Image (cartoon, rainbow, N blue to C red):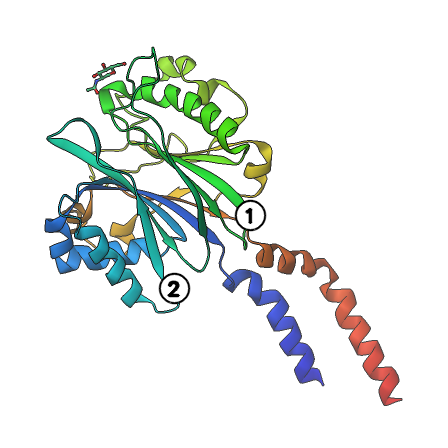
Amino acid sequence: MTHHFSLLILLLVCCPLTCHGFKICAFNVQSFGDSKAADSNVLHTLTRIVSRCDVCLLQEVRDQKKKAIPQLIRSLNNFDTNYQYDYVSSDRLGRTPTYQEQYVFVFRTGSVRLKDQYQYPDTQEGDEDVFAREPFVVRFQAPKTIIREFVLIPVHTTPTNATKEIDELYDVFEDVRKRWKTEHVMFLGDFNAACGYVAKKNRKNIRLYTMSSFTWLIEDKQDTTVRESTDCAYDRIVVHGDLFLRAIEPLSAQPFNFAREYHLTEVEALKVSDHYPVEVDLKTRSGSEQKSMTPYLLPLTFGFMLLFQLSVN
Ligand SMILES: *[C@@H]1O[C@H](CO)[C@@H](O)[C@H](O)[C@H]1NC(C)=O
């Protein structure tokens, strides 16, 4: 009987630690296409990085022949058979036909369902064309998370226009909020929101900064760049609303230093990208239920022991 008790206690105590949460990532893969996918070391590292995420936004995808992303997905599906991956991608976006990029969301089919997708239009009538690559907005259902459903608004800004483009995300937010009648919105991607590109004095011109309903989860002091010589929080994650904020694991938002994690030299890491991914964990339903069990652990154990004593006597 004591055996059963220890087992029960072990389960209740350890599960919140081992039962992992739900991870959202954003990774600027710096010109991802055939040549990176053809390098087996790069593809392997990329597979390890993306396989940590339930949803991963890839930016700077330049997959003209439409082979590199399917190759990454195959690699992911062979990597860990516990998870299967699929993806949804924007069209090729950019100001000139010669330089185009795609936003790609890679996701675990077992943890999310793609509910909606929406390409923010190139130019709103009468407005100037602010975005170099208009956000490709997606809505996911994620039954195991507390929030259950959320919208992701990605952006990879042009460095020299970063302040204006980040500010413009508020218009995208308003549009999406009306369109889908939802408040649960997360912005993510390479905002170029640091170092020389977004000066602190210009933040008053960015509504995502000035309006208190938005929370910036990746702090200024973080470094999302691979190069030793640079120290900039270019890549960011921003959430809207208290409900979404409370559905996020506190302090989980971080850059993922894959060079350190996988023991790569700077040169090896730079073959993958010059950015680190940024990541955040959402609270999951099972995780929270198990955590909320903890206060009852002691009384429960005593209760069982008492019952056991009574039944023996
Ligand atoms: C910067 O934004 C303006 C519109 O606000 C646009 O006309 C211009 O092309 C942009 N520059 C780049 C490099 O995207």
Rendered location of residue 107, percent (x, y): 37, 52
Q: Residue furthest top?
A: 126
Ligand 1 within 8 Å of disc 2? The answer is no
**Taking the image as four quarters, which one is ligand 1 found in?**
top left
Say what amino acid the circle numbered 2 marks. Answer: Tyr
Q: Is residue 104 left or right of residue 20?
A: left
- Where is the N terminus found, in terms of image quarters? bottom right
Relative to 269, residue 91 above or below: above
Is residue 252 visible in the rendered structure shown here? no
Rendered location of residue 292, percent (x, y): 67, 56
Is residue 224 visible in the rendered structure shown here? yes
Marks 2/1: CA distance? Answer: 19 Å
Instruction: Tell me the SS state at disc 2.
Output: loop
Rendered location of residue 289, percent (x, y): 64, 58
For mark 1, what is the residue? 148
Total labels drawn = 2
Task: Give the crowd class for mark 2: few <14, some 14-19, many >=20 residues within 10 Å.
Answer: some
Indicate the quadrant where residue 277 lies.
Answer: top left
Instruction: Tell me the SS state at disc 1.
Output: loop
Give the residue displayed 59% in from the left and 55% down from the top: 285
Q: Nearer the viewer, residue 110 or 25?
A: 110
- Where is the C terminus found, in terms of image quarters? bottom right
Task: Give the crowd class for mark 1: few <14, some 14-19, many >=20 residues within 10 Å.
Answer: some
Q: Nearer the viewer, residue 133 or 313?
A: 133
Q: Which mark is residue 210?
A: none
Q: Which mark is residue 83?
A: 2
Q: Nearer the viewer, residue 65 or 6?
A: 65
Relative to 184, residue 38 above or below: below
Say what amino acid the circle numbered 1 marks. Answer: Arg
Q: Is residue 188 left or right of residue 269?
A: right
Indicate the quadrant where residue 14 lies.
Answer: bottom right
